Amino acid sequence: MEQMIVVEQAKVDLSAIIERVRDEKSPIILTDKGKSSIKICLVENELDDKKGKRLGGFLKNTDNTPAPDNFDRLNEDEIFALFSGEYDEYSRG
C-alpha cells in the first residue's frame, strides 16, 4: 500500500523516507496542497547486482582492438607546447 506524505514533512524527513522505501520496498507519494505530485519508489539498477563494483568506463577496450604503436607519441609536439606555455591556439593554421 502506498503511503502519502506532505511535501513539507518530506523536506524534514527525506533521509528517513528514503530508508523506509528501501526497507519496505513500498512507494511513498508526496502530496502538495492535497494533490499527489511525486512518487518515491525503489529503483533496481546494475550496481545492486555488481555489489558496488565499478561499471566500465568510456575508455574500456571492449572489442580488443589494439592501440596504434605510436599512441603515446600522438600529438606529442602540441601536448609539449601546452604544458610548456608555448601553445597559442590562434597561431595554428
Image (cartoon, helix red, strand yellow):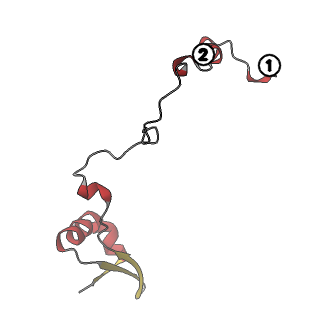
Look at the numbered disc 2 and give the secondary structure of its residue: helix
Residue furthest toward the right?
A: 93
In this orientation, which residue lies closer to the viewer: 11 or 90?
90
Residue at 30% over, 67% down: 12
Q: Amino acid at mark 1?
A: Ser
**Real-space Cα separation, disc 1 to disc 2, in angstroms:** 17 Å
On screen, residue 87 above or below 30: above
Percent x, y for residue 76? 60, 16
On the picture, is 26 further left or further right than 76?
Answer: left
On screen, residue 42 above or below 87: below
Residue at 82% over, 22% down: 93
In this orientation, which residue lies closer to the viewer: 72 or 23?
72
Q: Amino acid at mark 2?
A: Glu
Percent x, y for residue 34? 40, 88
Look at the numbered disc 1 and give the secondary structure of its residue: helix
Residue topped by disc 1: 91
Percent x, y for residue 72? 52, 19
Q: Quadrant of residue 20?
A: bottom left
On the picture, is 64 further left or further right than 14?
Answer: right
In this orientation, which residue lies closer to the viewer: 78 or 1?
78
